[in-house]
């Protein structure tokens, strides 16, 4: 309970300092709107249903992109872990691609798919699939050799060794991979929407910016942050915690 | 002959140097015998066990079980490792059921698992996760898992080496009782003289560099052996004497190694 109180005081403090600073230095609303303005524009977008519509559109893209990325990541990760030549060649390309933020592919994506949903989904898939691939590959490669030996002495080998031992043994890495993939996908989605077509949270943010509505811009930023935290804590950290508990592994904070 | 190890040699490549780990190993094992492979580290006892398990293949020579040549791992040889090697994504019971996926229904497998968990006195823990059990309990599950396959031979690779003294002593009694009850043939690798004398019908004493069989000792002490401490001590001293030269050799080699590096 003490933690919650600390946090409430912290956020109230930010709120008060922000409000005071604007009054004190007479900052105009186009530079930095007051927190009350942000709150009222947040309320406005909730009441007229536009926020819900944007969220719906954004999440549809996100879910499609993330599912495709996880599928590709799992299969490609297994492929790299199992085929040495592929790991030595394609693997190096994937590591290189990892250091390119997926959003810089947008100009090309727009040429290939047009200024529409598909381009944004492409960006999401690219960003999320790479991190999932890398984690899945590591997971399969790091399976304790003892598990494999033990299974072999119990007459399990070949495909069934892979399905019954290697795959389940790589689950902790896969879960971490999925969590990172979500984080990459969420950022790629916002960047993609900001630079491409609507409807969606990112697009509305861009729209508000074009009209100088900084209160709306900040309101959407807050929504993006809050959703990011909620999904991470409520879905991915929960799953991760459950796996850690079941396996008896320590959770790193 | 039940288990027959014939002229087994094993060498490994180590940075261009060929290292002879096992040389001229010949060993015949009767069904139902409890046999220990005893020796200092580096004598190749674990390597020999892994060859019998089919996890390693000999550089030359053969191993026959029931007159069949061993080429790969199989359910006729259950293995217990130094670490329990239980799968953390399965419950204790599911771990013991692991080998039965193809040959029986889940219901039947459960019955078998229960029977063997009872044998190691762990049936109340069937639904637990492996990590919720202590090291000694995990090792008992691992023994139950190997026995549940009803193998012809039980191979044990320093199974109690990672446990504390008290747990180890307790598990010696558990294992002795299981052996008296099931009459399984056991091949048991250890570097503890006491452990070997406590448990075995025969102790194969091995020497190092290259690994060879020094002596084949029959232990004629009635079971349970706790009641014959004096006789046990006599055997222990005899083996200690035998191994002293070997242990000195290991120490000397280590010193030489250190001096030359």
Image (spheres, rainbow, N blue to C red):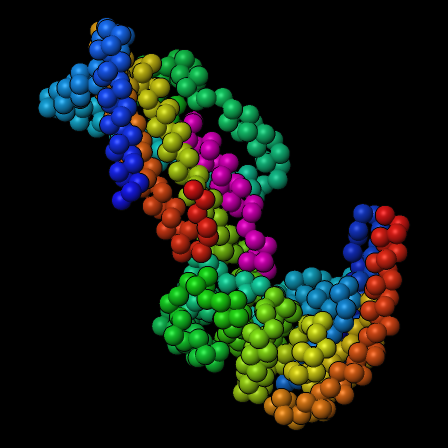
- The spot of residue B51 in percent (x, y) is 70, 66
Q: Is residue B26 left or right of residue A101?
A: right
Q: Which residues are magenta?
A: A125-149
Q: In which quadrant of the rendered view does residue B23 lie? A: bottom right
**Which residue is outermost to the left?**
A47
Q: Quadrant of the N terminus of chain B?
A: bottom right
Does residue B87 show up?
yes
Frontmost residue, B13 versus A250: A250
Image spot of residue B137 (x, y percent):
49, 71
Image coordinates for residue A123, horizontal then vertical, percent: 39, 23
Q: Is residue B7 visible?
A: no
Residue found 63% across the figure and 92% down from its top = B227
Q: Residue at x 24, y 27 (%)?
A: A12
Which of the two residues, A117 or B209, is positioned nearer the viewer here? Answer: B209
Q: Is residue B107 above or below residue B87?
A: below
Q: Is residue B131 above or below residue A72?
A: below
Q: Main secondary structure of the magenta part?
A: helix
What residue appears at the point 28 percent right and 23 percent down from the top-left corner?
A: A14
Inspect the magenta stretch and tell me whether residue A140 lies in it.
yes
Query: Is B186 on the left or on the right of B123, as rendered?
Result: right
Q: Classify residue B257 as left or right of residue B189.
A: right
Residue for point 46% across, 66% down: B133
Q: Residue lying farthest front?
A: A24
Towards the viewer: B233 or B139: B233
Q: Is residue B44 magenta?
A: no
């Amino acid at each position: 309970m003490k933690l919650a109180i600390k946090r409430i005081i912290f956020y109230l403090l930010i709120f008060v300092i922000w409000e005071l600073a604007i009054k004190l230095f007479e900052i105009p609303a186009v530079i930095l709107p007051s927190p009350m303005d942000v709150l009222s524009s947040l309320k406005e977008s909730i009441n007229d249903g536009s926020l819900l519509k944007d969220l719906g559109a954004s999440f549809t893209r996100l879910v499609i992109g993330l599912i495709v990325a996880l599928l590709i990541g799992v299969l490609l990760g297994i492929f790299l872990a199992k085929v040495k030549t592929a790991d030595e060649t394609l693997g190096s390309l994937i590591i290189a691609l990892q250091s390119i933020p997926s959003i810089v592919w947008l100009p090309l994506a727009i040429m290939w798919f047009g200024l529409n949903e598909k381009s944004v989904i492409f960006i999401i898939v690219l960003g999320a699939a790479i991190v999932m691939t890398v984690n899945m590959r590591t997971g399969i490669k790091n399976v304790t050799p003892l598990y494999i030996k033990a299974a072999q002495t119990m007459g399990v080998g070949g495909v069934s060794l892979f399905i019954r031992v290697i795959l389940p043994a790589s689950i902790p890495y896969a879960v971490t991979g999925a969590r990172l993939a979500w984080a990459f996908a969420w950022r790629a989605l916002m960047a993609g929407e900001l630079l491409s077509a609507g409807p969606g949270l990112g697009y509305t943010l861009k729209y508000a910016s074009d009209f100088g509505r900084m209160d709306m811009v900040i309101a959407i930023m807050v929504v993006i942050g809050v959703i990011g935290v909620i999904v991470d804590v409520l879905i991915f950290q929960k799953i991760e915690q459950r796996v850690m508990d079941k396996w008896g592994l320590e959770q790193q904070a | 002959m039940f288990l027959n190890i014939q002229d087994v040699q094993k060498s490994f490549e180590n940075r261009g140097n060929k290292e002879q780990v096992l040389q001229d190993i010949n060993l015949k094992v009767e069904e139902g015998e409890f046999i220990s492979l005893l020796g200092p580290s580096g004598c190749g006892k674990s390597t020999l066990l892994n060859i019998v398990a089919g996890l390693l293949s000999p550089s030359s020579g053969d191993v026959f079980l029931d007159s069949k040549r061993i080429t790969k791992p199989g359910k006729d040889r259950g293995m217990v490792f130094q670490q329990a090697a239980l799968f953390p994504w399965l419950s204790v019971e599911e771990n013991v059921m692991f080998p039965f996926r193809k040959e029986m229904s889940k219901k039947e497998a459960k019955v078998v698992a229960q029977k063997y968990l009872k044998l190691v006195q762990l049936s109340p823990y069937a639904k637990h996760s492996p990590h919720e059990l202590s090291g000694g309990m995990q090792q008992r599950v691992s023994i139950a898992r190997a026995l549940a396959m009803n193998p012809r031979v039980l191979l044990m690779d320093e199974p109690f080496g990672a446990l504390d003294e008290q747990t180890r002593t307790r598990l010696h009694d558990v294992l002795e009782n299981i052996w008296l009850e099931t009459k399984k043939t056991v091949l048991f690798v250890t570097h503890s003289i006491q452990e070997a004398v406590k448990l075995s019908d025969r102790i194969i004493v091995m020497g190092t560099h290259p690994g060879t069989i020094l002596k084949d000792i029959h232990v004629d002490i009635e079971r349970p052996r706790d009641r014959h401490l004096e006789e046990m001590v006599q055997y222990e001293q005899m083996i200690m004497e035998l191994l002293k030269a070997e242990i000195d050799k290991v120490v000397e080699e280590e010193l030489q190694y250190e001096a030359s590096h």
